[in-house]
Image: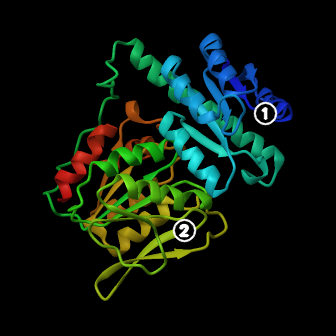
Amino acid sequence: MAVRVLVVDDSGFFRRRIAEILRADPRLEVAGFAADGAEAVEAAVRLRPDVVTMDVEMPVMDGIEAVRRIMARAPTAILMFSSLTHEGAEATLAALEAGAADFLPKRLQDLAADQAEAGRLLRERVLALAGGRRVQAAAAAAGASPAVPVRAPRPRLRPVPAAGRHELVVIGSSTGGPVALQHVLRALPGSFAAPVVVVQHMPASFTGPFAGRLDRICALEVREAADREPLAPGRVALAPGGRQLYLERTDGALRVRLRDPRPGEHYKPSVDVALASAAETAGAGTLAVIMTGMGADGREGARRLKARGGTVWAQDEASCVIYGMPRAVVEAGLADRVLALEEIGPALAADVC
């Protein structure tokens, strides 16, 4: 069965362009169009698409309010199109909090220099979001309570380390990560005894506003990471978009280092890069948490961390928007624990505080 997509934008040209890109894949079907947020809500209720692509700024009703109303009346996987500006970042983060699953730059040339590659990435993202939504729908149809999601069978757990063992926590996430990270970090007290490094796949213009948003709602201090800054308990360092974050130890203290991406490094920032450096600098004192996201970023870094005695947790399938990154870690046999989203924050607090 083809994935049905509702395309929402006030520009007729952009609607036609997105439809053309989607129709290039026989697995995708354009179910309908809407020119503003109000039309989008009614179309989503009437057509019940698998995925909605949504602009942020539109007449009559903006994309943020449209997301909120669609999620209340006809919950659907929603992909936002955003401008890569500070204002676009703030609006997109608000849309994600309202229930949108993911975002892409509205200027497709910002997604990839090659037009064909940009189209392929858009189709790939839509298909992935549809797959995640269908997994959640299947769990609901099987009788799962929304408050207690059905979880995939968990691997045999290794012994849980004693509380207070970890001197560093590294969290990696991608699609679905901005909202998931809020859940986790808000559960940590200001007295949290280890520094936290967060690597979220996100454009450079988004990480500053995202760090500011997290800082306003968390007991921990959250900042976009700066080169050579020391890590400290009670602080969260968010890897800046477009750079690679790694760690070094000088005079006994862990410090953030930043560098430009190298050829072949697809993710910027990369969970693998951060975890590989954590394995070398903190080793067995590192606890890594791999959360929702497409792809397998974090698997090889987790492998290196495990070889140095570190600990790896993974988010479970039922609570992920996209079960890609955690799946890669679990299927490689690297996960010490597999936890639902609502369990991760309390488990971190119990383990580290």
Quarter containing the C terminus? bottom left
Where does residue 341 sit, x and y in percent of width and height? 34, 39
Name the one closer to the observer, 68 or 312.
68
Q: In this view, does 58 lie above or below 112?
A: above
- The reply, left or right, for residue 147 in relation to residue 85 is left
Q: How crowded is mark 1: few (under 14 residues within 10 Å), some or many (20 or more)?
A: some
Q: In this view, does 291 lie above or below 113?
A: above
Where does residue 91 sit, x and y in percent of width and height? 59, 46
Name the one closer to the observer, 205 or 62.
62
Name the one closer to the observer, 238 or 340.
238
Residue at (44, 43) in percent of width and height: 179
Residue placed under numbered mark 1 in the picture: 18
Q: Which image quadrant for residue 32? A: top right
- Is label 2 in a helix, a strand or a loop? strand
Q: Residue furthest left?
A: 162
Q: Which image quadrant for residue 103? A: top right
The three-letter code of the residue at mark 2 reads Gln
Residue 244 tag number: 2
Label 2 and label 1: CA atoms lie apart by: 31 Å
Q: Do the residues labelled 2 and 1 touch (CB within 8 Å)?
A: no
Where does residue 39 sit, x and y in percent of width and height? 69, 20
Residue 85 in view: yes
